[in-house]
Image: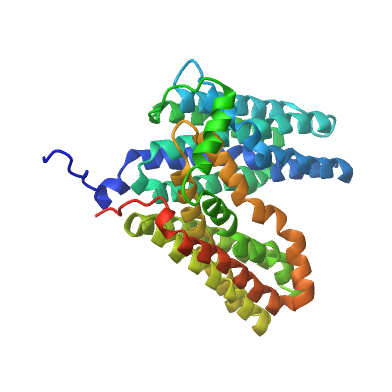
Amino acid sequence: MISGAAPRAPSLREVFTDRRLAFVLLMGFASGLPLALSGGTLQAWLAVEGVNLRTLGLTTLIALPYSLKFLWAPLMDRFVPPLLGRRRGWIVLCQGVCALLIGLMAALDAGAGALRLAAVAALLAFVSASQDVVIDAWRAEVLPAVERGLGAAGSVLGYRLAMLVSGAGALILSAWAGWRETYGLMALLMLLMIPVTLMAPEPDQPAEPGSLADVIGGALKDLLSRRAALGLLLLVVLYKLGDAFALSLATPFLIQTLHFSAAEVGAVNKGFGLAATLAGAILGGALMVRLGLYRSLLLFGAAQAFTILAFLLLAVQGKSYGLLILAVGLENLGSGMGTSALVALLMALCTAGFSATQFALLSALASLGRILCGPPAAALQLELGWEGFFFACFLIALPGLATLMLLRRHIPETAAAT
């Protein structure tokens, strides 16, 4: 081999058979499993036990750690557990504590001690959000550039499957086995994630930073010192903004305006829509191996934007089951592809050693549109009507594409596999 020659790009066969991708999917499952257990599934349990509405309302605050996890993410870059390394050491610790807390919830009486159960659930949300931080960092560091798209897709797939198990699956199981037994089984599933982490590879790590200030300052300096840094951060915010606006009011549009039943919306928008999202994520990840990051972001971003117009067609046509399936399928397919590309971009923007801090910050920026779009979306719909609203959502998606094209030279790119 000639000295200094560029390394050979891996073949598609080598990429798709890399065992790291299997671990990424399983880590995604571990990441998603606790979410519903401290959220929707917990609320269902409390509601069945007759807990009052005021207490149920307070349980919505339990999810706050998932939005604020960037505040303590630097701790997981700074400190290294004594065993298994910086990433797997933290992941195993979080998984063990999550299993313990879910098991503790199974031992509590929801009817007599709802507040105690909610307090344990709040602690579970904190530890689960911390696990998310480290798994995101692990994934960003363990995958080579050419596998980031497939890694993003595998992570989304594992996460959503876990949410089905601990959400709909737990609700169904509770009717047959009881709530406490259901939470006990979920604790066992969480415990089984520890052997997966023990077998997973530990990414190479640079030297341990000297202080927490070094981590925070180094992570921010690394992000902001890049060429077009502010433009890249703007792209992270804008990339899925139109998609977030459109999806924020999709359910009220289908039920209140088109008069589809809740069961029909649940089956199509939640069931079929989830399947389409997962298909989009997998398709996007596979295409990214060939297309590279920039072309994937551009193609999938355009798909996100134009599939919004299927809802515009539904608004013009009126109630139609065929158009409902088409609109939900296309929009969620485009959204899933866009999610894979965005997660791959976030991984590409992270630097080893600062990945926990940087990914947590970047994902918080990426979620701003989804979190904040509700009130302006409602105001927009009241002003423009449904047809105008969905066309406006399409227009809102275009600045993200324009920003991407302006930043083409600054997108962290990788050669596609051959």
The answer to whether any part of residue 306 appears in the image is: yes
Q: Quadrant of the N terminus?
A: top left
- Residue 306 screen position, x and y as percent: 53, 73
Q: State the residue lying farthest toward the left.
A: 1
Q: How is the image coloured?
A: rainbow
Side of 59 relative to 332 (left or right): right
> Which is more toward the observer, 266 or 136?
136
Against 391, residue 57 (above or below) is above
Side of 265 relative to 415 (left or right): right
- Residue 307 screen position, x and y as percent: 54, 71
Against 192, residue 292 (above or below) is below
Against 171, residue 373 (above or below) is below
Residue 64, image quadrant: top right
The answer to whether any part of residue 135 appears in the image is: no
- Residue 122 screen position, x and y as percent: 73, 33
> Which is more toward the observer, 401 or 52?
401
* Residue at left offset 49%, top offset 61%: 404
> Which is more toward the observer, 281 or 9?
9
Q: State the residue lying farthest toward the top.
A: 82
Side of 327 relative to 84 (left or right): right
Q: Quadrant of the C terminus?
A: bottom left
Picture mark count: 0
* Residue at left offset 60%, top offset 28%: 99
* Residue at left offset 52%, top offset 32%: 218
Residue 267, image quadrant: bottom right
- Residue 373 screen position, x and y as percent: 71, 59
